[in-house]
Image (cartoon, rainbow, N blue to C red):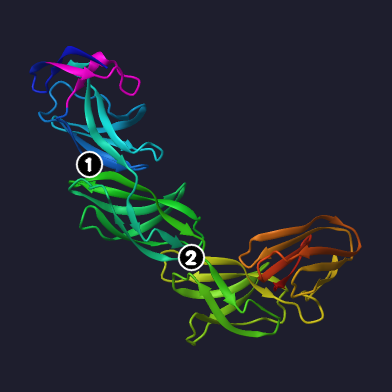
Amino acid sequence: MGRFLFCIISLVSISVCTAQAIPATVGGELSAASIHIDSSYAMVPNAAYQGQTITDTIEPAHGFIDCFPINVSLQHGATIVTGTILKSGADTIIASFAIPSTVDTGSYDLVMPLGLNCLGDTVLVPHAFRVEAASITDPDVAVQGQIVTTTIASTIPRKPGCYPTNIYLQKDSSKIKGSIVYAVHPDTVVATFQIPGTADTGLYNIIMTLICDSECCNFDSIPNAIRIEEVKISMRPDSARPGDTIHGCLYGTLGSSIQSMYLRKDGFTFPVVPELRSPPCFPIGAAIPQTAKAGLYDLIIILKDTVQPDSIIVRNAFTVVAPAGVADNNSFSNAIASVHVFPNPSQEALTISFTMNARSHIHLILYDALGRTVATLCDRTLGQGPQSFPWTTDKLPAGSYFYELSAGAEIYGGKILVRH
């Protein structure tokens, strides 16, 4: 830090000489001799969130006369956020700043190198801007397939005269367009989003296109505003045998109207239908065809009242169990002759055994009720003859588990109950 006499060239062409304490560097780049400190500049808005892209109007007290900025930046210690000048005028300049999500919060100086008759000079406006950490989004969690109405209340005032015209959620290259329901107050927006049933899970930014004073288009972004979670739906009962008719329930986060449903395995499908009953769940019924293959089935839910055709896929939602005496399988052909699970239900350990008709590469995988892999018991080539694989269950939570046994194009599966 040093003190020396220098002249501030005012923006009304009056030279004012003053003694001022000047930092040796600003952001590690600017020479002290070129800096003119001026607190008369106004930035609107003068704050933003981490990760936000903001459009700012910068207004000097007396206008720009032969000393237009050639670039702009925000500086906080060694941190520099470079802006882009979008429009220059005699009284204002408009610039945009993309605030990185990792920058420090706090007060930032506005730094503007000048051109024309002031080439070589730089204006520094101390504490002109601040970066904050949060906005408020309610709700801030949605699930796949849900229609959600969200209130976005900004903790940083938006420039008067700026209103959103379009809004969407964005995660990487994925975009979900929303509909603005209410945006009368510039700092509060209510919007509705139809979350696709196949949407990627994770954190999404809210991006809004703004019209400011009848001029389009500025952009506002709120980072990590909404988290989309995997839809959690379960069927009860979750297993039956070919020829059975089931009457049960869907439980979970069903956020949209259902148009139709069916169960699917390897291209084989059969319908699941809503029923006119009123238990504390979504009532369903299904007739399991006699020709249904044993194994794990995905539940496909076709949604209605959506802008585009949409569906929810619930992996491994239902198990078709083989007829009694065939041990979880209703057809055996080339590689595998029979499969047995004993004991089932299991308390401490069980054994999955089967007979190989021919040499083949075998995958034997165990899943929990949510379709997550619990164990891989086999992933290698086996020869002809009997095979067995033990599995310890005493440390697993009680509940339903499923095995899937594949040999080439042949796939078999069944349900395992763990009880303690």
> In the rendered view, would you say 121 is above or below 150?
above
Residue 403 occupies which quadrant of the picture? bottom right
Q: Which mark is residue 310?
A: 2
Q: Over which residues does the magenta segment extend?
A: 18-38
Q: Work out whether mark 2 precedes mark 1 in sequence or the reverse, and give the earlier one.
A: 1
Kind of residue indicated by mark 1: Pro
Q: CA distance from mark 2 to mark 1?
A: 40 Å
The residue lying at 70 percent from left, 77 percent from top is 292
> In the rendered view, would you say 147 is above or below 213?
below
Q: Position of residue 267 (x, y in %)?
A: 66, 68
The residue lying at 48 percent from left, 53 percent from top is 202
Instruction: Name the residue that disc number 1 marks.
Output: 45
The residue lying at 44 percent from left, 66 percent from top is 146
Location of the C terminus (image quadrant): bottom right
Q: Is residue 36 magenta?
A: yes
In front here: 12 or 177?
12
Element class at badge 2: strand
Element class at badge 1: loop
In front here: 362 or 157?
157
Q: Is residue 76 magenta?
A: no
Q: Residues within 10 Å of mark 1 (few under 14, many from 20)?
A: some
Q: Position of residue 187 (x, y in %)?
A: 24, 52
Q: Position of residue 208 (x, y in %)?
A: 32, 50
Residue 36 occupies which quadrant of the picture? top left
